[in-house]
Image (cartoon, grey):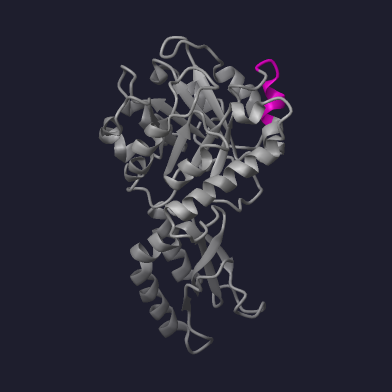
């Protein structure tokens, strides 16, 4: 079953960091309530720790449980398969509704076919490394990766202490493995992430913080904890990597160009072909009664991708703007380039 786009929540994010709520430490007898509660309390995703009792000593749940939970929430499902032979079962996890699937590089079976199967289904494919596994083990599969997950505890059990030395050694380097992705490449950190470690991992450029036991403590305000962890991670990024400048929220969009419809569609196809999502809207700069074929259309893209889009498509945008100006200048104002302002 191929799906063209992940199942994202409608609520826009005002943060760079995102929290994936791991349900490993939730009430396993009432997981439906756990996922609906995590969504209600503001988590960005659901993290599904699948264990088979072989690759790791613990045993959790499988695709049938995930499929039953899928209808309980609109949040994306990130499946972390800590199993010995994911290739044998990958179709079942994809059919269950997982939006991303991450497998371990330490498994003994061939990895590439499983990564290709995940991507062929329109989902994000990831590889995970245990604390003692070097990131270089991922290099042969770099071109197939949408996600790099770094374990900061030994996989198999929740509630372990965060390994700060592993985070410092691997998280920034993990970003380099995703340099081929103009949009959508994500570094995940999994293990012992809480309010005490959030600022550190944020300062190391992590995109997705997998948070488990810290969210499910009895009496704890989950919504406050999610907000706190996101805010601390963003502050870590701001002062650790971004020279004191607040990070760009994930869901902020900016106008990249304003062009007549033919040129706008051409540029949209080229940008989307490079992996950056683009939205096309009628520009408010023209009167409402202007014909759609004559009016300008705004190309909106994620603000976090604006710099990459300018570098790759800045000249092309200028060329199309000049072409539009020559062909339509007699009837209205020429096309314009990016405003740089949020739409």
Image quadrant containing the C terminus: bottom right
Q: Which of 318 and 217 is in front in this view?
A: 217
Identify whether 206 is placed above or below 308: above
> Is residue 57 highlighted in magenta?
no
Identify whether 130 is placed above or below 194: above
- The answer, for residue 72, to whether it is visible in the render is no
Name the residue: 55% across, 20% down: 63
Percent across and percent down for residue 11 are 66, 48
- The answer, for residue 260, to whether it is visible in the render is yes
> Is residue 34 highlighted in magenta?
yes
Q: Is the magenta stretch mostly helix, strand or loop?
A: helix
Name the residue: 40% across, 40% down: 146
Left-right relation of 126 to 157: left
Percent across and percent down for residue 75 are 62, 37
Percent across and percent down for residue 216 are 66, 27
Q: Residue furthest right?
A: 219
Q: Residue furthest bottom?
A: 330
Dividing the picture into quadrants, the one containing residue 124 is: top left
Name the residue: 46% across, 23% down: 81
Left-right relation of 32 to 136: right
Percent across and percent down for residue 291 are 60, 76
The residue range painted magenta reads 28-35
Looking at the image, how many numbered discs can be counted on the residues? Answer: 0
Dividing the picture into quadrants, the one containing residue 121 is: top left
Name the residue: 31% across, 26% down: 133
Identify whether 72 is placed above or below 43: above
């Amino acid at each position: 079953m191929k799906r063209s786009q992940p199942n994202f929540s409608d609520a826009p994010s005002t943060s760079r960091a995102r929290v994936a709520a791991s349900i490993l430490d939730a009430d396993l007898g009432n997981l439906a309530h756990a996922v609906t509660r995590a969504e209600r309390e503001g988590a960005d995703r659901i993290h599904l720790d699948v264990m088979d009792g072989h690759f790791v000593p613990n045993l959790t749940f499988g695709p049938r449980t995930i499929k039953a939970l899928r209808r309980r929430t609109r949040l994306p499902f990130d499946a972390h398969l800590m199993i010995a032979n994911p290739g044998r079962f990958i179709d079942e996890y994809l059919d269950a509704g997982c939006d991303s699937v991450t497998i371990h590089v330490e498994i003994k079976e061939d990895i590439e076919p499983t990564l290709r199967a995940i991507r062929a289904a329109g989902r994000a494919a990831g590889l995970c490394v245990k604390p003692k596994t070097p990131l270089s083990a991922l290099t042969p599969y770099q071109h197939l990766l949408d996600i790099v997950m770094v374990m900061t505890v030994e996989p198999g059990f929740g509630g372990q202490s965060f390994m700060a030395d592993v985070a410092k050694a691997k998280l920034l380097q993990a970003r380099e493995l995703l340099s081929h992705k103009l949009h959508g490449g994500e570094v995940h950190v999994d293990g012992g992430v809480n309010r005490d470690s959030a600022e550190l991992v944020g300062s190391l450029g992590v995109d997705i913080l997998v948070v488990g036991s810290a969210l499910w403590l009895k009496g704890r305000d989950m919504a406050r904890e999610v907000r706190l962890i996101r805010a601390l991670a963003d502050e870590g990024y701001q002062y650790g990597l971004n020279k004191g400048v607040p990070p760009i929220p994930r869901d902020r969009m900016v106008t990249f160009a304003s062009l007549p419809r033919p040129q706008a569609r051409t540029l949209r196809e080229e940008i989307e072909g490079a992996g950056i999502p683009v939205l096309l809207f009628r520009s408010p700069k023209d009167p409402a009664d202007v014909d759609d074929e004559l009016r300008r259309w705004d190309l909106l893209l994620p603000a976090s991708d604006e710099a990459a889009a300018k570098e790759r498509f800045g000249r092309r945008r200028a060329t199309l703007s000049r072409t539009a100006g020559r062909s339509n200048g007699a009837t209205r104002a020429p096309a314009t380039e990016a405003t740089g302002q949020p739409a």
